């Protein structure tokens, strides 16, 4: 098992998650609400991501099946844990915050939030963002990560996300992954 590869990828994932926390931070500032929640969450997530991604130098080796499974499993877990920080800072219990975050990143849509309008606009945006990121994460799992692990997708609904097919096997290359993001960001 190449733990440096796993830790390096998880660090990069946390770093990107931390950068995304800036969006609700600016929304809170725009609406005159306290940006402290997302400033703290941003700082904690960026520090953890930086420690993993840059202090633990990732090996320059390719992933194998074990590393891929570890990255997916721990990536979802890390995203849910660090994604829960803003909910905790807004007054939710840690278990409810983790549930809300995991629910978003797995796109189940379940919620434990009561009186939703009482939360800051930034937190409500964050809640929506993690559901959107969860949906895109599942699509990217099928389009980007599984083929790297040697798994090929046979003639499924994913054929509509990529512009070409070859012998009923999707050719999942970088331009097709970009096309998938483009379709997700700009439908129609």
Image (cartoon, grey):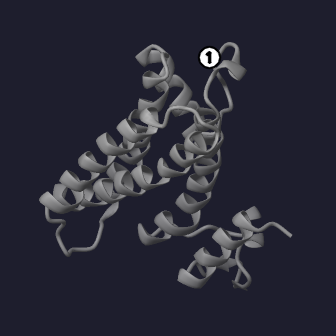
Mark 1, secondary structure of its residue:
loop
Report the residue marked by disc 1: 112
* Location of residue 115 in the rendering, given as x and y in whole percent from the top left corner: 70, 14
**Would you place residue 181 above or below residue 33 in this image?**
below
Closer-to-camera residue (67/166): 67
* Location of residue 167 in the rendering, given as x and y in whole percent from the top left corner: 70, 84
Horizontally, residue 93 falls left or right of residue 65, namely right
* Res. 102 in view: yes
Position of the N terminus by quadrant: bottom left
* Number of numbered discs visible in the structure rendering: 1
For the point 59% across and 38% down, which residue is it? 122
**Would you place residue 106 above or below residue 13 in this image?**
above
Position of the C terminus by quadrant: bottom right
Closer-to-camera residue (171/27): 27
- Most extreme residue toward the front is 32
For the point 17% across and 69% down, which residue is it? 59
Closer-to-camera residue (86/106): 86
Say few, some or many: other residues with alpha carbon within 10 Å of mark 1 (under 14 / 14 to 19 / 20 or more).
Answer: few
* Location of residue 20 in the rendering, given as x and y in whole percent from the top left corner: 49, 53
Horizontally, residue 154 falls left or right of residue 66, namely right
For the point 33% across and 59% down, which residue is it? 12
* Res. 1 in view: no
* Location of residue 93 in the rendering, given as x and y in whole percent from the top left corner: 45, 13
**Would you place residue 52 above or below residue 108 in this image?**
below
For the point 29% across and 55% down, which residue is it? 11
């Amino acid at each position: 098992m190449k733990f440096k590869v796993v830790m390096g990828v998880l660090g990069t994932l946390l770093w990107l998650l931390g950068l995304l926390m800036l969006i609700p931070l600016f929304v809170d500032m725009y609406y005159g609400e306290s940006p402290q929640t997302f400033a703290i969450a941003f700082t904690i997530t960026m520090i953890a991501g930086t420690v993993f991604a840059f202090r633990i130098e990732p090996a320059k080796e390719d992933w194998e099946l074990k590393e891929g499974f570890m990255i997916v499993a721990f990536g979802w877990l890390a995203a849910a844990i660090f994604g829960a920080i803003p909910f905790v800072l807004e007054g939710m219990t840690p278990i409810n915050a983790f549930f809300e975050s995991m629910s978003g990143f797995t796109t189940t849509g379940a919620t434990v939030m009561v009186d939703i309008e009482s939360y800051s606009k930034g937190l409500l945006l964050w809640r929506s963002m993690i559901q959107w990121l969860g949906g895109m994460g599942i699509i990217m799992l099928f389009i980007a990560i599984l083929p790297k692990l040697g798994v090929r997708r046979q003639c499924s609904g994913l054929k509509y996300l990529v512009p070409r097919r070859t012998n009923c096997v999707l050719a999942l290359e970088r331009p097709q992954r970009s096309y998938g993001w483009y379709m997700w960001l700009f439908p129609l």
